[in-house]
Image (cartoon, helix red, strand yellow):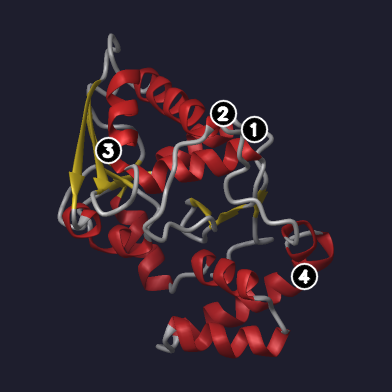
Amino acid sequence: METVRRGYEPKDTMEFGPKAAGKLNAAAQELHFLINRGYDTKSASTFVGNHHLLSERQRLALARMTSPDAALFARAKKELQQAPASLVLDGFNTIITLEVALSGSLLIEGMDGTIRDLAGLRGSYRLVDKTYQAAELLLNRLEVLGVKNALFYLDRQVSNSGRLRALLLDKAEGRSVRVQAELHPSVDGVLSRMEHVVTTDAIILDKCGSWYNLNRSLIEQAVPKAWIFRLDKPAL
């Protein structure tokens, strides 16, 4: 199996290092100020990014970390503090973030407390060495939490989604958690209408009935040395 550092970008060490932290924190506060006053996130990110001469990757991180107060409040009200008996998981969203953590690549902490990656998924995905580790860690964590049923939704149109489904089902054999995995053409749409969701996708978090922040606790416990860029403090 090929050894791959999922989400690794050589420039991240500089663009998200100590010298860049002050600029990114200032930019996040400005973006937060603007979107709280109704400005579109994309146009506000462009404006703030141009002002601070941010790279495209820094701008992407800024947009993914920052949310308006109304969204943060609504997400906090729907966040489950304990894992329920049944969870529905945004499969690629969850697995890829764990792969990035295991690769030592950049992760970012959102104002809503979620841990996100910048790896992206543009219709192309392949299983790598970290995929197997991520699946093991994830299923182990579900067992520890006492989860009895876990339903993974995977984007049907993404390459190798069938192989990831087969891997999850194989790794789940003999475990106390009952795992199902479905390929679906519109995962975001399905999860947006459900309860007990595991995802870091902001659109889904805003629309779903309730959610559980699984990746954060899993990464903090199982990958304590993961590289997570955090803002100094929430700009609330």
Residue 158, percent from left and from top: 32, 52
Residue 107, percent from left and from top: 60, 51
Real-space CA distance between mark 4 and mark 2, rounded to the nearest whole angstrom: 28 Å
Residue 149, percent from left and from top: 21, 26
Instruction: Name the residue rendered at 60%, 35% in the picture.
Output: 102
Instruction: Please tell me how crowded label 4 is: few (under 14), some (14-19), or many (20+) other residues with Cα within 10 Å.
Output: some
Comparing labels 3 and 2, the label whose residue is closer to the camera: 3
Compared to residue 139, the image places residue 27 above or below, namely: below
**Residue kind at label 3, given as amino acid type:** Gly
Left or right: 120 in relation to 142: right
Residue 15, percent from left and from top: 75, 65
Instruction: Please tell me how crowded label 2 is: few (under 14), some (14-19), or many (20+) other residues with Cα within 10 Å.
Output: few
Would you name the residue on which mark 3 appears? Answer: 162
Callouts 1 and 2 close, C-beta under 8 Å: yes
Would you name the residue on which mark 2 appears? Answer: 221
**Residue kind at label 1, given as amino acid type:** Pro
Q: Is residue 32 visible?
A: yes
Instruction: Please tell me how crowded label 1 is: few (under 14), some (14-19), or many (20+) other residues with Cα within 10 Å.
Output: few
Q: Earlier in the sequence, mark 4 or mark 2?
A: 4
Q: Earlier in the sequence, mark 1 or mark 4?
A: 4
**Residue kind at label 2, given as amino acid type:** Gln
Front-lying residue, 3 or 176:
3
**Residue kind at label 4, given as amino acid type:** Gly
Real-space CA distance between mark 3 and mark 1, rounded to the nearest whole angstrom: 30 Å
Instruction: Name the residue rendered at 34%, 27% in the picture.
Output: 167
Would you name the residue on which mark 1 appears? Answer: 224
Q: Which element type, helix, strand or loop, lies under badge 4?
A: helix
Left or right: 2 in relation to 54: left
Left or right: 168 in relation to 190: right
Q: Earlier in the sequence, mark 4 or mark 3?
A: 4
Front-lying residue, 123 or 208:
123
Real-space CA distance between mark 3 and mark 2, rounded to the nearest whole angstrom: 29 Å
